[in-house]
Amino acid sequence: MPPLARQHFPTTRSWAYLNHAGICPLPQPAVDAMLRRAQEASVDGEFTYEQHKSDNERIRALGARLMGVPADDVAFIKNTTEGLGFVANGLSWSPGDRVVIPDGEFPSTLYPWLALQDQGVRIDRVAPAGPGGALPVEAFERVIRQGPPPKVVVTSWVQFGTGWRVELPALAEVCADVGALLCADVIQGLGVVPADLDRWGVDFAMADGHKWLLGPTGSGLLYVRGRHLDRLRPLEPGWNAVRHREDWDNPHLVYDPTARRLEGGMPIMSGIAALGASLGLLLEAGVEAVWRHVDALCEHACEGLTKAGAVILSDRSAAARSGIVSFSLDGLDAPAAALELRMRGIACSARSGALRISPHGYNTFEEIDRLVAEVRRLAGSPR
């Protein structure tokens, strides 16, 4: 049985939904939580605020538990891009400072750092070290040690196109050795692969809810290691960023001592409620159990697709694999195939000339078999 109960996912009535690296379908408990907060606000307006505010702190603790970090080090954000921007633009920079980042990163993971070049910041790239977009720690280390120590090393935990999973604990050790900060975009891993970011030594991490966290767009989580909080200049100081929030007649700017200082103004109450419901589902099932199931689904897909003549482009070695599998097949145009699969009730994506699937903890082996059968038909394979 899948670790996430299928009855919570209305999408299963219409789709074999294998696109959680894109935009997830909301589980019903998340929809119910969002509607409940909106309905309460429609009836009682301002008088819902205290209860909703209190519930947000419970949800903050759930997010911290999933990330493996202290709750005081977690802020709610709108999306991953905002979290990356808070770090890139909140740090102070000098001409000649270095940032190390992989080639082939998702644009939002790259652009905040490229935008620093007008301050004289140098951006050095880590080239993939082999097939499957391999980014072993040794590839990072070569670039990190070529020149003055970087100020920040940036990477996605899981690369969006190939599914390569960077070994964050080992990379954090290299960063600590040279005095660099490690900033990880964890959107393609958090919620499906167990995380222990504080113990691993990650300094900053961010993810929004609309992928593996099974939450709505417009809500997400930012982790800032506590000892680095004062190194970030809050970019949106407001009433909710200060120690004396809701003391409206106090004009002094005294930042909250926790990561809440980065939240600025009014949070998106209904979105956080929905995210909280989804976090609850993941934690109740256990991310370890979710990961075992998703990993087995991906292995099953690789076996079936290989027999159908596909080439698996994702590295499926134990340390590098994730919930993403990219594959190609001679004569199969990836965007056209993704559209045709959509017409047949199977949700996946085309990325960089390949088809990409990304199942979650409620998907089944039968849905994977259905995908493989349709790919065979599209390719005209007799096998």
Image: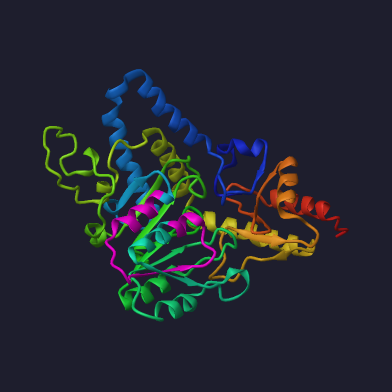
Highlighted magenta segment, given as a residue range: 82-111
Dividing the picture into quadrants, the one containing residue 17 is top right
Q: Residue at (75%, 45%) from the top-left corner?
A: 340
As drawn, 108 above or below 239: below
Rendering coords of residue 54 (x, y %): 28, 36
Rendering coords of residue 139 (x, y %): 49, 77
In magenta stretch: residue 252 = no
Q: Is 87 on the left or on the right of 19, as rendered?
A: left
The residue at the far top in this view is 43
As drawn, 380 above or below 178: above
Q: Residue at (15%, 40%) from the top-left corner?
A: 244
The residue at the far right in this view is 382
* Near-viewer residue (283 or 53): 53
As drawn, 26 above or below 258: above
Q: Is 340 on the left or on the right of 37, as rendered?
A: right
* Near-viewer residue (28 or 76): 76
In magenta stretch: residue 99 = yes
Q: Residue at (29%, 54%) from the top-left corner?
A: 73
Quadrant of the image containing the C terminus: bottom right
Q: Is 344 on the left or on the right of 180, as rendered?
A: right
Does residue 220 appear anywhere in the picture? yes
